Amino acid sequence: MADKIRMAIESEGDRPVTDLHHWRLGPGHLGAIVSVATSWARKAAHYRQRLAKFADLSHVAVEVQYPSSSA
């Protein structure tokens, strides 16, 4: 499942998934915490939508990391 989650997040050029944890919540239910680095103006909801195709993922938390804009 970790590879499927990683591929779903990274499929549109967002790289890398910097942190990924998943665990079983109960029969047929998984939870996941994903941190993704991106330079795109995408919100966490965008990534949760990508993961919605996995019926077993019942609880998903997404952290989005943007590049530092300080010069």
Image (cartoon, rainbow, N blue to C red):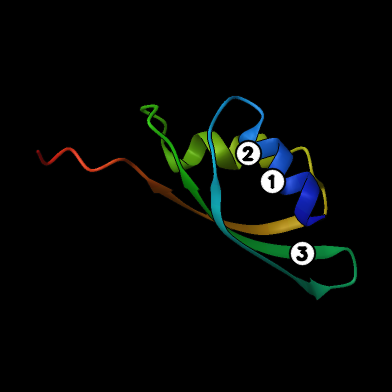
User: Left or right: where does residue 50 sit relative to residue 35?
Assistant: right
Circle 2 residue? 9
Instruction: Residue 6 in the image: state x and y as whole percent.
Output: 69, 46
The quarter of the image holding the N terminus is bottom right
From this view, report whether residue 58 is shown above or below residue 9. Answer: below
User: Left or right: where does residue 16 sit relative to residue 2?
Assistant: left
Instruction: Check disc 3 and report its element: helix, strand or loop.
Output: strand
Q: Residue at x 56, y 26 (%)?
A: 13
Circle 1 residue? 6
- Badge 2 or badge 3: first in the primary sequence: 2
User: Left or right: where does residue 46 sit relative to residue 25?
Assistant: left
The quarter of the image holding the C terminus is top left
- What amino acid does circle 2 point to? Ile
Q: CA distance from mark 2 to mark 1?
A: 5 Å
Q: Residue at x 78, y 50 (%)?
A: 3
Circle 3 residue? 30
From this view, report whether residue 9 is shown above or below residue 59. Answer: above
Is residue 12 among the parts visible in the rendering?
yes
Is residue 52 among the parts visible in the rendering?
no
- What amino acid does circle 3 point to? Leu
Which is nearer the eye, 11 or 53? 11
